[in-house]
Image (tube, rainbow, N blue to C red):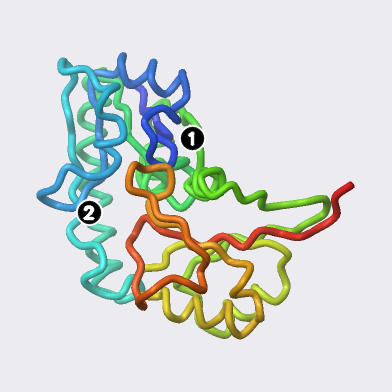
C-alpha cells in the first residue's frame, strides 16, 4: 500500500509559527524531504529542526543552481526541469514502498513554492495532503506591525522580476502591495516605488520572523541588492470607521 505525500507549510521562519497539524505530521512521517542549495542544510530544514525526530529518514533535494543564471534562460529551465523530475523519482520510490513523506515548504506550500512542482508531478499517482502555512508576507507584516488592507483596499502581490514598466503600472493601480523576489531586482523595484510617488509609504523587511530580522523604511535602505528572504510592504490607506 502506497504512502501519502504531505506538503508541510513551515511559515515565515519562526519555528513556533508552524501549525499543530504540521508538527504532528512531522513527528509521524518516516521520511522528511526538503529543498536546499547543494551542499547546504537549507532554511526549511533549519526552521523544522526542533520538530523532526531522529528516527526519520532525511531526504535533501539540492537545487543544481539558484541565481547563477537568469531564471528565464533555456539553461535554467532545463536544469530545473531535470531536477524536479529526479526529485519526483526519489519521492515516488519511497511512497511506493509505503512510506509517508513530509515535504517541507517555507511559508505556504501553494504560494510561490517549489513544493508545487512536485505536487503536480505526483498527485495523480499518490494520495496527497497539503498543510497550509503562514505566508512570508503575513509574517513580515506582523513583524513590521503594518496593517496591510483597510475597508475595500485592493492588495497586489508582485514579483520583482516583472519588467520595470509593469511594476510601475501595477503599483499605480493598487491600494496596497507586497513585492517579492527582490535580490538583484531591488534597484529596479525601488525606482518603481519612487516614480509612482509611493516610496515613503513602503517598508523593507529582511528575514522577517527570523532572529536576525531587519525592518526599515524603504527610503532608508542602503545598497542596490537584497537577500532572498526579503520583501517590500506598502500598506493600504483605505476606508476605516
The one of 103 and 78 positioned closer to us in this rendering = 103
Q: Residue at x 40, y 55 (%)?
A: 214
- Element class at badge 2: helix
Numbered disc in front, either 1 or 2: 1
Q: Residue at x 29, y 26 (%)?
A: 101
Q: Residue at x 65, y 81 (%)?
A: 196
Q: Residue at x 41, y 67 (%)?
A: 182
For residue 187, which quarter of the picture? bottom left
| Residue furthest to the left | 39
In the rendering, which numbered label is found on residue 133? 1
For residue 120, which quarter of the picture? top left
Q: CA distance from mark 1 to mark 2?
A: 25 Å
| Residue furthest to the right | 241
In the rendered view, does 121 fall on the left or right side of 150?
A: left
Q: Are marks 1 and 2 in contact (CB under 8 Å)?
A: no
Pointer 2 local density, CA inside 10 Å: few below 14, some 14–19, many at least 20: some
Pointer 1 local density, CA inside 10 Å: few below 14, some 14–19, many at least 20: many
Spot occupied by residue 220 in the image (x, y as percentages of width and height):
47, 71
In the rendered view, does 199 fall on the left or right side of 213?
A: right
In the rendered view, does 117 fall on the left or right side of 49?
A: right
The one of 75 and 36 positioned closer to us in this rendering = 36
In the rendering, which numbered label is found on residue 83? 2
- Element class at badge 1: loop
For residue 225, which quarter of the picture? bottom left
Spot occupied by residue 67 in the image (x, y as percentages of width and height):
26, 68
Image quarter of the N terminus: top left
Spot occupied by residue 133 in the image (x, y as percentages of width and height):
48, 35
Amino acid at each position: 500500500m502506497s504512502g501519502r505525500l504531505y506538503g508541510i507549510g513551515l511559515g515565515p521562519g519562526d519555528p513556533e509559527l508552524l501549525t499543530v497539524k504540521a508538527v504532528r505530521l512531522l513527528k509521524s512521517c518516516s521520511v522528511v524531504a526538503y529543498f536546499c542549495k547543494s551542499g547546504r542544510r537549507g532554511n526549511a530544514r533549519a526552521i523544522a529542526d526542533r520538530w523532526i525526530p531522529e528516527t526519520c529518514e532525511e531526504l535533501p533535494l539540492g537545487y543544481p543552481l539558484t541565481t547563477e543564471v537568469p531564471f528565464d534562460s533555456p539553461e535554467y529551465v532545463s536544469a530545473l526541469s531535470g531536477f524536479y523530475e529526479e526529485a519526483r523519482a526519489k519521492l515516488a520510490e519511497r511512497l511506493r514502498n509505503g512510506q509517508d513523506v513530509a515535504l517541507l515548504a517555507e511559508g505556504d506550500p501553494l504560494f510561490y513554492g517549489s513544493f508545487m512542482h512536485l505536487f503536480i508531478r505526483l498527485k495523480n499517482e499518490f494520495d496527497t495532503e497539503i498543510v497550509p502555512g503562514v505566508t512570508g508576507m503575513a509574517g513580515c507584516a506582523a513583524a513590521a506591525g503594518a496593517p496591510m488592507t483597510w475597508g475595500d483596499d485592493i492588495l497586489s502581490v508582485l514579483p520583482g522580476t516583472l519588467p520595470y514598466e509593469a511594476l510601475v503600472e501595477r503599483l499605480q493601480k493598487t491600494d496596497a502591495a507586497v513585492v517579492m523576489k527582490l535580490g538583484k531586482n531591488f534597484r529596479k523595484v525601488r525606482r518603481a516605488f519612487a516614480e509612482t510617488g509611493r516610496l515613503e509609504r513602503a517598508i523593507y523587511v529582511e528575514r522577517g520572523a527570523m532572529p536576525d530580522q531587519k525592518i526599515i523604511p524603504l527610503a532608508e535602505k542602503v545598497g542596490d541588492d537584497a537577500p532572498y528572504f526579503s520583501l517590500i510592504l506598502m500598506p493600504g490607506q483605505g476606508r476605516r470607521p
